Image (cartoon, rainbow, N blue to C red):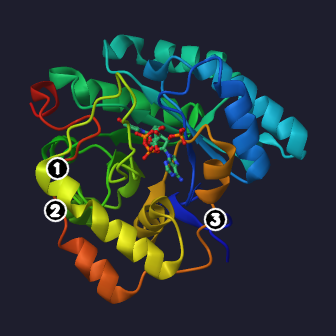
């Protein structure tokens, strides 16, 4: 089975493609063409969020992609995310996202962040209701830590079906992933390419790489050379070999293709073991160090 055919189960009748197309920092101007191009080259999962402010353009790209490939809606997997707010408005927020996307349902709907505080459980109940109403085939969370997941368990509610978190060799979150596995919560990896030296290096795209991380850069380059692939391909393959769906974003057509071209090699056990020693903590893409996310 090729990487493009490969999926991971999220619930009894929902499987998420191993590689999806990320749309964070994809502007409404760029999104229609980028998403159409991604679907044309083989991506079958598109990840967006209300807070990315590109849902209408992503929806247009999905329609254009389906038209140019002859695929139908059921062939695609679409993830959308609720920005936490008043739980009373959750259904309205979901309906607004669906309207902007031009879809009747999404395949996965996530609470984008645990920062809802005391409202978290009410938000989660609202997502369960949206699933019952057929607005989402699966529901989950994003950026939740173990204590946020335990809160749901302690309330006796069904657990999230997925948790989308920053996962790459510098942020491996072994305890969180083990807890998720033990509780049937599928891990979805974002910012898989964070270890690239070029990652978010444009003006205004801040990241928080430590000196230790910068010293590690060469390890991935050397390993990638060994497998005759790019560092990006190595990092994406690492995620998939760990069982994580990945969501690379690229506006560059060549990289867009490269990021799904992951079949010709597999990372040997000894290299997976070496990478497992390179965990450098909470991550650098978004959630680390933000006090509102750890309450
Ligand atoms: N739930 C959350 O809180 C959360 C947070 C962050 C991200 N996400 C999701 O995960 C997706 C991916 O994360 P991300 O966008 O942070 O980062 P990413 O996909 O790991 O990296 C994207 C960056 O890498 C570059 N790139 C892509 N392919 C490359 C390649 N083959 N070689 C070299 N550079 C390459 C891109 O530039 P070019 O476009 O110029 O190629 C872009 O600067 C997001 O788009 C979003 O959908 C979710």
- Indicate the quadrant where residue 127 lies: top left
Residue at 34% x, 22% y is: 204
Quadrant into which the N terminus falls: bottom right
**Dots 1 and 2: beta carbons under 8 Å?**
yes
Q: Is residue 137 left or right of residue 102?
A: left
| Residue bearing mark 2 | 175
Residue 194: where, in percent of width, then height? 34, 48
In terms of depth relative to the viewer, which is nearer, 251 or 161?
A: 251
Residue at 40% x, 30% y is: 202
Quadrant into which the C terminus falls: top left
State the mark number for residue 146.
1
Circle 2 crowding by C-alpha within 10 Å: few under 14, some 14–19, many from 20: few
Q: Helix, strand, or loop for circle 2?
A: helix
Q: Helix, strand, or loop for circle 1?
A: helix
**Dots 3 and 1: beta carbons under 8 Å?**
no
Instruction: Give me the C-alpha separation between circle 2 and circle 3.
Output: 30 Å
Q: Is residue 80 visible?
A: yes
Q: Is residue 36 left or right of residue 53?
A: right
Q: Is residue 11 visible?
A: no
Q: Helix, strand, or loop for circle 3?
A: loop
Circle 1 crowding by C-alpha within 10 Å: few under 14, some 14–19, many from 20: some
Circle 3 crowding by C-alpha within 10 Å: few under 14, some 14–19, many from 20: some
Residue 260: where, in percent of width, then height? 62, 59
């Amino acid at each position: 089975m090729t990487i493009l055919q490969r999926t991971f189960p999220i619930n009894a009748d929902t499987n998420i493609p191993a590689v999806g197309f990320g749309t964070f920092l994809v502007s409404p101007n760029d999104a229609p063409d980028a998403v159409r191009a991604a679907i044309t080259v083989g991506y079958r999962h598109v990840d967006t969020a209300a807070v990315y402010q590109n849902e209408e353009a992503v929806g247009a790209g999905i329609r254009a992609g389906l038209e140019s490939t002859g695929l139908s809606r059921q062939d695609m997997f679409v993830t959308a995310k609720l920005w936490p707010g008043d739980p009373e408005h959750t259904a309205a927020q979901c309906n607004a996202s669906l309207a902007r996307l031009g879809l009747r349902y999404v395949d996965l709907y996530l609470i984008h962040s645990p920062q809802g505080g005391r409202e978290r459980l009410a938000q989660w109940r609202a997502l369960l209701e949206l699933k019952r109403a057929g607005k989402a085939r699966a529901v989950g969370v994003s950026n939740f830590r173990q204590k946020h997941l335990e809160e749901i368990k302690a309330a006796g509610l069904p657990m999230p079906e997925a948790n989308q978190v920053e996962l790459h060799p510098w942020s491996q979150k072994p305890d969180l992933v083990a807890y998720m596995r033990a509780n049937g919560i599928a891990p979805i990896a974002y910012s898989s390419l964070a270890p690239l030296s070029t990652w978010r290096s444009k003006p205004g795209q801040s990241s928080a790489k430590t000196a230790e991380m910068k010293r590690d850069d060469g390890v991935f380059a050397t390993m990638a050379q060994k497998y005759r692939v790019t560092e990006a391909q190595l990092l994406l393959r690492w995620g998939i070999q760990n069982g994580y769906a990945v969501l690379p974003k690229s506006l560059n057509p060549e990289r867009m293709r490269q990021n799904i071209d992951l079949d010709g090699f597999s990372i040997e056990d000894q290299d997976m073991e070496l990478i497992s020693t390179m965990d450098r903590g909470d991550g650098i893409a978004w959630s680390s160090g933000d006090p509102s996310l750890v309450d």
